């Protein structure tokens, strides 16, 4: 038995040098624990950044202004962005959970990639209340 994290669903996402996420639309349920298996099948590094549109735009501007990373800015430290960098040929697993219904943007913020269309969406929907607790609910 695993006590820590029970993954409800595994989703595979491919990133490549045509500047696309495949698929570029993920539909998940709020509260569902997901395992994203993110593969970079290109020859360039790519990253998957998740966040609100505003947070992503702000970050994209930052990346451009500090091209050549001056300040050692770490994506993961921005509180409303989640980021996963994947080197060429690598696959990374990312266990992630969204607690509330929302629409998140997915983007690769490596300079030039987002502009080239490397973006997508994650749609988090309220979970239909019929899955686990149809007969009884425990508190
Ligand atoms: Cu990219």
Image (cartoon, rainbow, N blue to C red):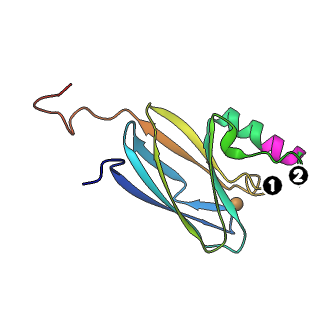
The residue lying at 61 percent from left, 39 percent from top is 51
The residue lying at 71 percent from left, 66 percent from top is 45
N-terminal of the pair, mark 1 or mark 2, is: 2
Q: Position of residue 97 (x, y in %)?
A: 44, 42
Q: Position of residue 26 (x, y in %)?
A: 47, 50
Work out whether 89 lies above or below 122.
below
Side of 82 relative to 63 (left or right): left
Q: Nearer the viewer, residue 35 or 14?
A: 35
Q: Nearer the viewer, residue 105 or 77?
A: 77
The label number, if any, that marks residue 103 in the structure image: none
The residue lying at 21 percent from left, 24 percent from top is 139
Give the total number of marks visible in the rendering. 2
Tag 2 residue:
67
Q: Position of residue 30 (x, y in %)?
A: 39, 36
Categorize mark 1 by other alpha carbons within 10 Å: few (<14), some (14-19), many (20+).
some
Work out whether 92 lies above or below 9.
below
Find the distance from the CA under tag 1 to the CA under tag 2. Answer: 8 Å
Q: Are marks 1 and 2 in contact (CB under 8 Å)?
A: yes
Side of 121 relative to 139 (left or right): right
Q: Nearer the viewer, residue 117 or 17?
A: 17
Q: Position of residue 130 (x, y in %)?
A: 20, 35
Quadrant the N terminus occupies: bottom left
Is 115 magenta? The answer is no
**Residue 110 occupies which quadrant of the picture?**
bottom right
- Tell me the chief SS of the magenta region: helix
Where disc 2 sits, the SS reads: loop
Side of 55 relative to 132 (left or right): right
Taking the view exactly as shown, the residue that stands out farthest to the top is 139
The label number, if any, that marks residue 111 in the structure image: 1
The residue lying at 35 percent from left, 53 percent from top is 9
Work out whether 1 lies above or below 101.
below
Span of residues in magenta: 60-65
């Amino acid at each position: 038995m695993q006590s820590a994290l029970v993954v409800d669903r595994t989703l595979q996402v491919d990133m490549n040098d045509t500047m696309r996420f495949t698929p570029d639309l993920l539909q998940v349920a709020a509260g569902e624990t997901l395992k994203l298996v993110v593969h970079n099948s290109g020859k360039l590094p790519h990253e998957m950044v998740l966040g609100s549109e505003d947070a992503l735009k702000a970050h994209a501007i930052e990346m451009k202004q500090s091209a050549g990373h001056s300040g050692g800015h770490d994506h993961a430290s921005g509180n409303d962005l989640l980021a996963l960098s994947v080197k060429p040929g690598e696959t990374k697993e990312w266990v992630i959970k969204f607690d509330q219904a929302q629409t998140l943007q997915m983007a690769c913020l490596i300079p030039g990639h987002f502009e080239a269309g490397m973006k997508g969406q994650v749609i988090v929907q309220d979970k239909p209340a019929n899955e686990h607790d149809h007969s009884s609910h425990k508190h």
